[in-house]
Amino acid sequence: MRLTAALFSILTLAACAREQQTDAPAAKALSCAASEGGAVTASNAWVREQKDASAMTAAYFSLCNGSMTPVTLTGLKTPIAGMAEFHETSRDENGVVSMAPTGDIQLAPGERVVFEPGGKHVMLMALPAAIESGTIAPLELDFADGGHVTIDAVARSAVEAASDSAGHDHQ
């Protein structure tokens, strides 16, 4: 049983990892337009398909703070998972990939944070059922000020996600 859990953890890390591009801007450095009366918005939401309900999966999206005040993302709720945590995948100087919780995520006015494979993402755990490609799931993003943003995410297989990201800028 422990071997199975260890193997699953390694496979999960591998699924969340990807080659880092040295010339790509840091996900947190991307900007979006802030304006008076602007709002926090989410876009490009998707979830990695998971046919094994006893396993975990991940959710990805782009989050823009279009308001003139800083905001703090504190949680995410969805009916397709009993538990969700913000994580980030990183690679050390030896090329070893690891994943760790990030805690709350702060966004300055006009700042965009991209949740994507190989970077920040939301680990979805305690799945009540398998998640098939094409499933639509609401993701409710919770903020420190009590606000919420809800976006529908579509489940994609690894093949669908790879082919979509080849021609999609995720902004």
Image (cartoon, rainbow, N blue to C red):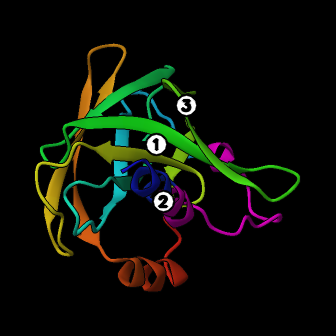
How many neighbours does mark 1 have within 10 angstroms: few (below 14), some (14-19), or many (20 or more)? many
Foreground mark, 2 or 1?
2
Give the mark nearer the N terminus: 2 vs 1: 2
Q: Is residue 47 left or right of residue 18?
A: left
- Residue at 46% x, 54% y is 3
* Residue assigned mark 1: 64
Amino acid found under the numbered disc labelled 3: Thr
Residue type (three-letter) at the residue carrying disc 2: Leu
> Could you tell me if residue 65 is visible in this image?
no
Start-end of magenta stretch: 10-30
Q: Earlier in the sequence, mark 1 or mark 3?
A: 1
User: Residue 160: x percent and y percent?
Assistant: 36, 82
Q: Are marks 2 and 3 in contact (CB under 8 Å)?
A: no
**Which amino acid is tagged 1?**
Cys
Residue identified by numbered label 3:
102
Does the CB distance between marks 2 and 1 fall below 8 Å? no
